[in-house]
Image (cartoon, rainbow, N blue to C red):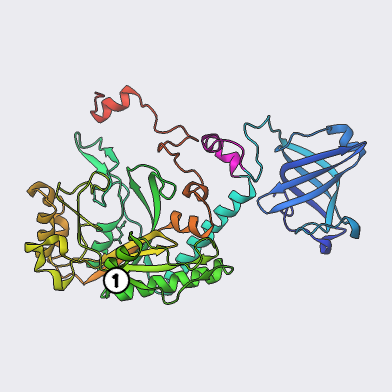
Amino acid sequence: MLRSHTCGELNKKNAGKEVTLSGWVDSMRISGKIGFLILRDRYGKTQCFLGKNIIEEFGEIRRESVVQITGVVKERPDNQKRDEPTGEIEISTSTLKILSECQPLPLELDDVVQTSEDNRLKYRYLDLRRPVMINNLTMRHKLIHHLRNHMDNKQFLEITTPILTKSSPEGARDYLVPARLHPGKFYALPQAPQQYKQLLMVGGIDKYFQIAPCFRDENARANRAPGEFYQFDVEMSFVHQEDILNIIENLMIDLVKNLFPEKKITQIPFPRLNYDDVMKKYGCDDPDIRKDTKNPDELGFCFVINFPLFVKQSKEDFFHGAGQEWGPSHHMFTMPHEDDLKLLDSDPGKARSYQHDLVLNGMEVGGGSIRIHDPKIQQQIFDLIGFSKEQAGEFKHMIEAFTYGVPPHGGIALGIDRLLMLLMNEPSIREIIAFPKNKDARDVTMDAPSKVDKAQLDELGIKKK
Ligand code: ASP
């Protein structure tokens, strides 16, 4: 190792020990013949005292250069101690090596951002050095770790599903991938692993989850990452709707208790609210139930249930993949309420469904449903949303699977990025993603999307218009 310790761990107990630290020059101050260098890494900052010889040899070292420092840990006199994790000590540097010199920076790395978002994203690898960003990524890691542990303890299996697959409508446009070996045909990137997780239930995996990448060609919003995002995806067999809500409620309570102990959940159990009531009272289907909506440490979770099965297609809210009249409120695999099955023929707009949304502080953070497992009802829904024979044919594997013994099942998926954004009090989803797309769905760091060679297109049998 090029270090014996990190920049965040030394204290007076280490006094007298020779150590080697490696990291970035956070700042440097020369006063006369001596100097102080603050060395930083992911774990913290350590002050290093530089004597005359080192100052004479190196002079001012550029900020953000990577250096290696060896020296002895010295306890600071009481009046120089700082209330910081390494504030009791400093390193009396004996050797310093510049491992990589930093050129003038294209952006400042202050805690308060002073540059445009695109500049931050272009130099994301620099932006990530800021402690706020390191903390956001650390919390993202912890959250995912927590989800995995919690589900593992409850006997859920984590199963990965294909990325190159077939269009599976969740309401957005698909990303298509040309299939070289099958000219004229395309894979689609999954908008969600919806069909696979249902097929896993047919396969007898009664408790499934996945940290699933999902791809939807839609426009960016503060709370929506364009292009791709990660879902905590869950499916279970032999359950009622309430069983799914309980699993998620317990998981959220456990998560907040362990990772965000300073936060208070407004109401436990989370209220289960009727769609109609919520629309009447709040005028939207993602109500903020907190008493004090300005308090970021209050978490108002609730479930909204009894959604209508369909919504009228509109320009603003168009379910891509469905016809012109009705779009599924959730998706086309959601089970109609059994009391409303008769309405499907006479008044489909009035039929309720077994959809459930999880809402946190006025934002939808998850959605799911009990699924249709009767092929006849599934066919009826396809007809109602205006599927042609060919469109319905694209789902014949589901209809067929449902003829070989399918357990009643249901599930839910939570948007990991959005959930974390709310828990971290960040104003934009892009703050908690390492390399997010910008508002125009471009990857500014790598400059994607980008042009491709004519030879590549020829190989794929694609001609530009
Ligand atoms: N696939 C759904 C979605 O992405 C979630 C679900 O129904 O479980 O919204």
- Quadrant of the image for the C terminus? top left
Q: Residue at x 32, y 42 (%)?
A: 217
Left or right? Give the position of 324 relative to 17.
Answer: left
- Give the camera-side residue of 193 and 282: 282
Residue 443 to residue 169: above or below? above
Q: Residues within 10 Å of mark 1 (few under 14, many from 20)?
A: many
Left or right? Give the position of 355 relative to 417.
Answer: left
Secondary structure at badge 1 equals loop
Image x and y of residue 56, in percent: 89, 33
**Residue 120 painted magenta:** yes
Image x and y of residue 100, in percent: 70, 35
Left or right? Give the position of 178 relative to 101.
Answer: left
Determine if residue 2 is in view. Answer: no
Residue 451 to residue 422: above or below? above
Image x and y of residue 420, in percent: 49, 57
Identity, as a three-letter code, of the amino acid under mark 1 = Asp
Determine which residue is flagged by label 1: 206
- Give the camera-side residue of 29 and 407: 29
- Give the camera-side residue of 299 and 439: 299
Quadrant of ligand 1: it is bottom left
Magenta residues, start to end: 113-128
* Residue 295 quadrant: bottom right
Count of numbered tags = 1
**Residue 6 painted magenta:** no
Residue 213 to residue 339: above or below? above
Q: Residue at x 86, y 46 (%)?
A: 49
Q: Residue at x 20, y 49 (%)?
A: 313
Left or right? Give the position of 85 relative to 110.
Answer: right
* Residue 409 quadrant: bottom left
Determine if residue 210 is in view. Answer: yes
Image x and y of residue 177, in percent: 28, 39
